[in-house]
Amino acid sequence: MAENAFVAQAPALDRALIAKSHPHIIGGAGWFWWIAGLSLVNTVLIHSGSNTNFVIGLGFTLVADAMFKAYKVVAFSIDAVALGTFAGLGFLARRGQLWAYVTGLVLYALDALIYLAFQDWMSVAFHGLALFYLFRGARQLHAALKAAQAEPPAAGA
């Protein structure tokens, strides 16, 4: 029994270092920030009376802004949660958290359904492009984490 208590623990993976070493992981995570940033611009445009918007932004925030245009505090609160979520997912994806990629992929795919319902094909296409890069980053992170777990510990460690 004493032998079982003294089993060597596997070293913890430095997920952030692994993520930084792969450009597709960092690039994919950056898409979360583009989505959040351009959604913020869309929010400002809508509330300033413009009919222009960026196709890569969140449809969810556009719907919230349109529904609550008369109640700006409500619209901005909903927008802040959505934008904060995507910005946070970007930060966590850059730190090597695969679940952040997966969560973001699901949320952004659901968001694409909003544009699909309104038959805004340009926005659907750009959502598809962003989803491609998010998926590529997630796939690369998964592969890098799997490879790092399979590597034997360095000599002297």
Image: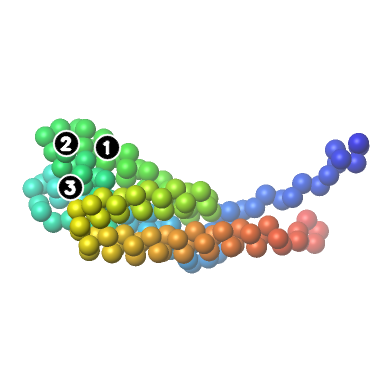
Query: Which marked residue is nearer to the observer: mark 3 or mark 1?
Result: 1
- Callout 2: 10 Å neighbours few (<14), some, many (20+)? some
Dot 1 lies on which element? helix
Q: CA distance from mark 3 to mark 1?
A: 14 Å
Q: Are marks 3 and 2 in contact (CB under 8 Å)?
A: no
Q: Residue at x 21, y 47 (%)?
A: 62
Q: Is residue 49 above or below residue 135?
A: above
- The image's colouring method is rainbow
Report which residue position mark 3 lands on. 44
Q: Amino acid at mark 2?
A: Phe
Please rate how many residues cluster around mark 1, counting C-alpha atoms within 10 Å: few if below 14, some from 14 to 19, many from 20: some
- Contact flag, marks 2 and 1 (Cβ < 8 Å): yes
| Residue found at x 41% / y 64% | 133
Which residue bears the numbered disc 1?
78
Residue, disc 2: 68
Going from N to C along the chain, the mark reached first, 3 or 1, is 3
- Indicate the quadrant containing the N terminus: top left, top right, bottom left or bottom right: top right
Where does residue 42 sit, x and y in percent of width and height? 20, 51
Asked if disc 3 and disc 1 are in contact, CB closer than 8 Å, the reply is: no
Marks 3 and 2, how far apart at CA: 14 Å
